[in-house]
Amino acid sequence: MRPALEVADVVRTHGDEFRQTHAGSLSAGQKRVLRAIERCRTAALGGHLEQCDRCGHERNAYNSCANRHCPKCQSLARAEWLEKRQAELLPCEYFHVVFTLPEPLAAMALQNKRQMYGLLFRAAAETLLSIALDPKHLGAHIGFFCILHTWGQTLTHHPHLHCVVPGGGISPDDDRWIPCRPGFFLPVRVLSRRFRTLYLRYLKQAYAAGDLQFYGDLQQLSDPHMFARHLAPLGQSEWVVYAKPPFGGPDRVLDYLGRYTHRVAISNHRLNGMQDGKVSFAYKDYKQEHRRKVMTLSADEFLRRFLLHVLPDSFQRIRHYGLLGNRHRKEHLARCRELLSMPEPLSPPPHNYRERSQQLTGHDPLQCPQCKTGQMLRFALLPTHRTSIWNTS
């Protein structure tokens, strides 16, 4: 069911004014996201006509924009990704570790997203791999994947990495499976300090190589002495690495992943209303025991915050490492299953769009909304409209 209010409605109502106000600061990628969201599932993208094979009811079915920042276009991508991950689950406890970029670095990352988000992946992954391999801790090669989120509940910039890790790994001699202690993965303080050391090291290297650019309020960081002064306190502070309670078995992991992968900064279902140039949305206040509250922002500020989370073109926000790295994942998983005496998983039957959507949402997208018994069949194409009622320049 379509929510009463969507991010697309905000863009269509206030997008032109927002573009004009921020014409000098919007990136090409942010402009493309606005254009894609406002056109998504409208006549501007074309589509087809459907008719019920029972009652004759007709409807337009417009194409999706397929933009990864669009709240309406992630369900099927998420379902396909989850199908692949289901075949890779191992019969062990799973852990969830979150690496957060400190606020002074988060501000810098807004101006250097590709470089500093990339370093977040690199430092977090190397931290997990090195500490797990250390004989003082687990003493094993592990595998995991990481999901980048850049937002907090109120759409503020809060870059952090969710890492999902099987509770064990393969011994260095490739001869046995080494499990984690029940309910315990790796010491958080050790992870935090290694993460801090690695990230600051790689950040200084990137700066020395001229890979970072600063402007506006951060222009002063272009001076090496000011940059070093800015980083100095970060080398002494405790960085936030949070190990959440373990998931339990593989079935719990998939339930979690269904909520966390392929997410955008805010879902349409969190929007409460739009009136008098303001947008209201629900959020959880984690400082007050996850209490649900409502925040109201001007439409301009709402769109500004939403666009903070547009990623650079082709930037991968889900990455796999170690035993689950893309290059040798198949061989590593086969060895893990062998050591765990686990049979090869059965290949899932192929699904079409209708089956995937029904499995994910419980709703059959082709069921007639009028008679509830017939099936909607395509009978004519709707051409793409080259011109739109919205100014998308």
Image: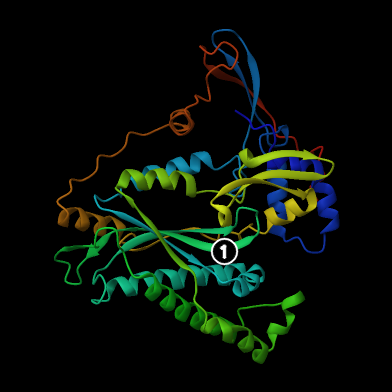
Could you tell me residue 195's position as x and y percent?
44, 75
Does 37 appear above or below 376?
below
x and y percentages locating residue 47 in the rendered image? 64, 30
Q: Can residue 81 be spotted in the picture?
A: no
Q: Residue furthest bottom?
A: 225
| Residue at the spot 79% in from the left edge and 38% down from the top edge | 388
Give the total of numbered labels: 1
Q: Quadrant of residue 61?
A: top right
Question: Which percent across, then down, holds residue 96?
Answer: 39, 58
For the question of whether residue 168 can be seen, the reply is yes
Please state if 115 lies on the left or on the right of 19 as rendered. Answer: left
Query: Residue 22's image quarter?
Result: bottom right
Report crowding for label 1: few under 14, some 14 to 19, many 20 or more residues within 10 A (C-alpha).
Answer: many
Residue closest to the eye, 164 or 319: 164
157 vs 328, left or right, is right
Q: Is residue 221 above or below residue 47?
A: below
Indicate whether 274 appears above or below 59: below
Quarter of the figure with residue 348:
top left
Q: Position of residue 184 (x, y in %)?
A: 30, 62
Q: Secondary structure at mark 1?
A: strand
The residue that disc 1 covers is 159
Q: Residue at x 32, y 43 (%)?
A: 251
The colour scheme used to paint the residues is rainbow
Q: Amino acid at mark 1?
A: Pro
**The N terminus is located in which quarter?**
top right
Residue lying at the far top of the rendered structure = 55
In the rendered view, does 357 fall on the left or right side of 165?
right
The residue shown at (46%, 34%) is 360
Left/right placement of residue 184 relative to residue 73 reads left
Q: Is residue 180 positioned above or below 337 on the image? A: below
